[in-house]
Image (cartoon, helix red, strand yellow):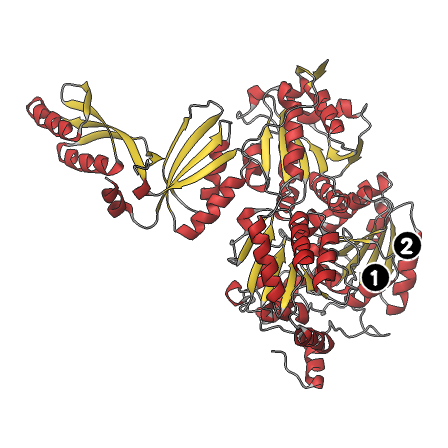
Amino acid sequence: MRLTGAQALVRSLEECGVEVVFGLPGGAILPVYDPILDSPIRHVLVRHEQGAGHMAQGYAQVSGRPGVVVVTSGPAATNLVTPLCDAFMDSVPLVAVTGQVARGAIGTDAFQECDTIGITRSVTKHNELVTDPADIPRVVAEAFHIATTGRPGPVLIDLPKDVANAEMEWTWPVAIDLPGYKPTIKGNGRKVKEAAELIRSAERPVVYAGGGLLKARAAEELARFVDLTGIHVVTTLMARGVFPDSHELALGMPGMHGNYTAITAFQQCDLLIALGARFDDRVTGNPAHFAPGAKVIHVDVDPAELGKVRVPDVPIVGDCRVVLGQLNDDLVKHGVGDVDRTAWRSTISGWQERYPLRYQQSEAGIPLKPQFVLEQLRDHTPADTIVVSGVGQHQMWASQFWQFDHPYTWVNSGGLGTMGFAVPAAVGAKVGRPDRTVWAVDGDGCFQMTAQELVTAAAERIPVKVAILNNAYLGMVRQWQELFYEERYSEVYLSPDLPDYCKWAEAMGCVGFRVDAAADVVPTIEKANSINDRPVVIDFRVDEFEKVYPMVPAGGSNDTVILGPEGDEAAARSGVAPS
Amino acid sequence: MSDIDQSEHAPRHHILSVLVENRSGVLARVAGLFARRGFNIFSLAVAPTDDERFSRITIVVDVASAPLEQITKQLFKLVHVVKISELHPAESVERELMLVTVKAEPSLRTEIIGLAEVFGGHMIDVGYAELTMSLADSPDRLDACEALLRPYGISEIQRTGRIALPKLRRA
């Protein structure tokens, strides 16, 4: 059967199981948009290509299926660079198709030409320029294979306009021939035995659960591991939800804004079981002082992560779900050891009692606390609500104060820290899980970067809900200037009511609410929850001066946790100074 | 030869032999991983192997071992990189090709040709007052020959960068 390159592309996407693409047409991609009209694939028309990328990320994170983006050449491709980099850092499977000028015009500075392959080379797992229409099915099949296997990531296909217009002979399925790409899935048996031995003899073990567990869909194996061993679990920002916060062995988030117990359990453990985690600087602080007394088991599907920051005692390359399965089988077969860990458990519960997360509750007459808003939102939404955040203070508060009890209910930009991630990612998440309530928790600074995608949401009837924690500042930067730059506030003030968020929301086809008082928080959340035919935006006017605590200053040792005013007060009352 | 190699470029000098799929853009991907970290590639040689689907890239870099290990792991993540081996100078044989044009007045020709013969080089072009010779040998022998030719006046020199294979076992 003869097809054009464009028809072959759309057909290949269908064959790969794509149900939705996020995109925006333009000159070089025009041929592809014609067969999209006849395809069962849903197309979500974005207002900016960056939005398409983040939507695809949100979609992929909650659904486990790769997110697909189709945009044109030049400025569309450069607008896509940020989400590609974001997806690369957070290992999110994406397939992006960009239009390109015709083959003969490449390299001539043609209209809307850019070197997409060159520009995106370092922010994609792989990319490929298609030079022959006959290659399209293979290139698409390989793109999905590469994006979704091993350590997932974004793959970009650059399609010149004349290749899309040229005819080819359609064949499917196609053989994938990638001699240099063979991810290791199963862990080395000897290493797994060594790991099991360390686990059996550890006195103070802790699991360091990373986002790789979610990518490997390993939540059940992790639960089985914890059932077997009774070992506590710390979940990184990227792993929130992989282990239920309500579990008695859950310690919450570690790192720069982690809680005291999670941070200190790492510092004082004798065995760190790192699963799909990458010893990011936001977790380790100064790596020379991180978990100084711990032996390390490090499981990751990406061999380049093993030894990158910390040389592990037992490195295991493999898929976290498979390796945890092997480990669990060994622990079942040979036992979990008989070390008495009562002392370690009571040390941990002592920390939890003394150093919980604290803030001053909202009362009438004092400014609304962002943490209070989050607690109310958490308590007045369904338990399996998907929370999507931007980047900054609100992101940390969301991670700290939400209770994540289900995997794939937390979407955020961890590695790249992309402000403006929340709104489009929430739209994508709602497309991926229309059955779930999706709340974006956003900052006022973040919201202004990508709010236009609420127009997309309104037009496409994607009823997401957005809670803006509006403190009128670029809050995290303000916090650093307060703590480390002698309160010299440089270019961080944004104003609480410029723009008017309610009017803006309404102009974009959403419902807008404003909340200033603690008493209005719950009723407004309930009103928002009852609206399901359009997006809702709530402008929560929160305390400008609230800071995120605990905090370990950048590059500092995790032995010195700043608990903040409320935390220090509580520690003083209990008569114990934080170590 | 191997002892010369070691004395010449000890501890930071590394040779990577990278087998890649013979596809467009592979070299840029490989080079990009070094450029991103600010490491300079000392020499580079690329050519197809006996199997036309694959090419071999021989890269010489001056990098400490720890970052090199990380780069090697990152290189291996490139979809089109099939195999990477580090060739330790003491355990590999290396060759490089040099073409050099030397100023040679007729009165000096014999002397220069004699010098070339000592190194096993060949005269491949002769002009009125210049000679072009080729020499394929270990990089250090090329360095030595170049140093001896320099006083005569080198007008052009071109070296290929080294290629290398592991030494064979004799026992």
On screen, residue B8 versus residue A540, left or right, reads left
Mark before the other along the chain sequence, 2 or 1: 1
Q: Chain of mark 2?
A: A
To which residue does mark 2 refer? A529
To which residue does mark 1 refer? A378
Residue A29's x, y, as percent?
69, 26
Q: Nearer the viewer, residue A338 or A43?
A: A338
Q: Chain of mark 1?
A: A
Quarter of the picture containing the N terminus of chain B is top left
Q: Nearer the viewer, residue A394 or B141?
A: B141
On screen, residue A542 versus residue A305, left or right, reads right
Q: Can you tell which quarter of the image residue A183 is in?
A: top right
| Within-10-Å neighbours for mark 2: few <14, some 14–19, many 20+ | some
Which residue type does callout 1 highlight?
Arg
The residue depicted at 49 percent of the width and 32 percent of the height is B26
Q: Can you tell which quarter of the image residue A533 is in?
A: top right
SS under mark 2: helix
- Have a look at marks 2 and 1 and say if they share a chain: yes
The residue depicted at 78 percent of the width and 67 percent of the height is A371
SS under mark 1: helix
Quarter of the picture containing the C terminus of chain B is top left
Which residue type does callout 2 highlight?
Asn
Residue B5's x, y, as percent?
26, 42
